Image (cartoon, rainbow, N blue to C red):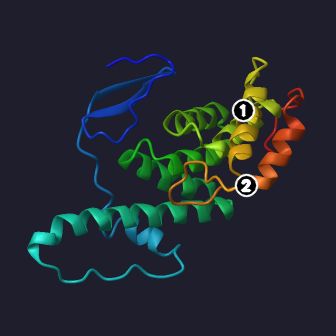
Amino acid sequence: MLCGVTETLGNDLGVLELQQAQGIFYFRKSTPPQALPADGGQHDKYDQWLDTPRAQPAVIPATESADITTNSEATSFDDALHAAHQLLNQNAFSEAETLLNSLLAHQPWSVDALLLAGLVARWQRKFEEAYDCFKRAIYVAPECWPAHFFQAEIFRLGELTDNPTQQQRGYAAVIRLLDASQQANGGLRVISSPIAPGDAYFLATRYRNTQPVTQGVG
């Protein structure tokens, strides 16, 4: 199913699955989600990064098992997102990348995972990959001001060539979204924004009309 450039069905209908190829977004018949790694695999690894151990599952009636399984998977995914965020803050980029790749294989359109993956790729100087992650996050959640901000930073710092309006559009989106609500979470469901709203607003206002500078990571 093909849509116009301003049309989207979201990604939570359960019938069609959002895809991207060569900068084009489209929908196709949904496929069952991949399972998170079983215990003894990635779970054991990211358990060590969490401040508290995961709670042991309680014995539940068989009639409730399906709902509890779904909740457990969601909790594990959220725990892993926090772990990836912590790894990013510790500059453990390779480990964060490995974990985020696993999470995005399970939920390719998680705004939280896409934002973190973009930041990790940027620090690894994979600027095209970082841009793609931010672009996907914005497509799913146009209100994701952190993705708008970091995408604009890529152009301001010359990490990718500006066209030259993308930088201004990105910062303008940050200002517009935060003008509407200084407490906006940017569409993030689990993690908090890596940059505070007030800082993003101040920098977006300052840099909105500047020209790109020498390539580097800011």
Could you tell me which secondary element the residue under label 2 belongs to?
loop
What residue lies at 88% left-to-right and 31% top-to-bottom? 214
SS of the residue under disc 1: helix
The amino acid type of the residue labelled 1 equals: Gly
Q: Which residue is mark 2?
A: 195
Residue receiving disc 1: 170
Residue 128 placement: quadrant: top right
Q: CB atoms at circles 2 and 1 under 8 Å apart?
A: no
Q: Is residue 120 visible to the viewer in this orientation of the structure?
A: yes
Circle 2 Cα neighbour tier, 10 Å, few/some/many (<14 / 14–19 / ≥20): few
Q: Residue furthest front?
A: 180
Viewer-nearest residue: 121 or 31: 31
Left or right: 164 as drawn, with respect to 75: right
**Which part of the image, by quadrant, shows the C terminus?**
top right
Q: How many marks?
A: 2
Q: Is residue 104 left or right of residue 137?
A: left
| Residue 177 image position (x, y, % from top left) | 68, 41
Q: Residue 200, how many percent across, how many down?
A: 78, 48
Looking at the rendering, in which quadrant would you find the N terminus?
A: top left
Q: Earlier in the sequence, mark 2 or mark 1?
A: 1
Q: Position of residue 190 (x, y in %)?
A: 51, 60
| Drawn side of residue 162 relative to residue 143, left or right | right
Residue 106 to residue 56: above or below: above
| x then y, percent, for residue 67 | 22, 65
Q: Is residue 82 left or right of residue 39?
A: right
Q: Tell me the quarter of the picture where residue 204 sits.
A: top right
Q: Residue at x 44, y 81 (%)?
A: 53
Q: Is residue 125 visible?
A: no
Tell me if mark 1 has few (under 14), some (14-19) or many (20+) residues whose alpha carbon lies within 10 angstroms of its own.
Answer: many
Which residue is at 58% across, 50% downward? 116
Q: Amino acid at mark 2?
A: Ile
Q: CA separation, marks 2 and 1?
A: 15 Å
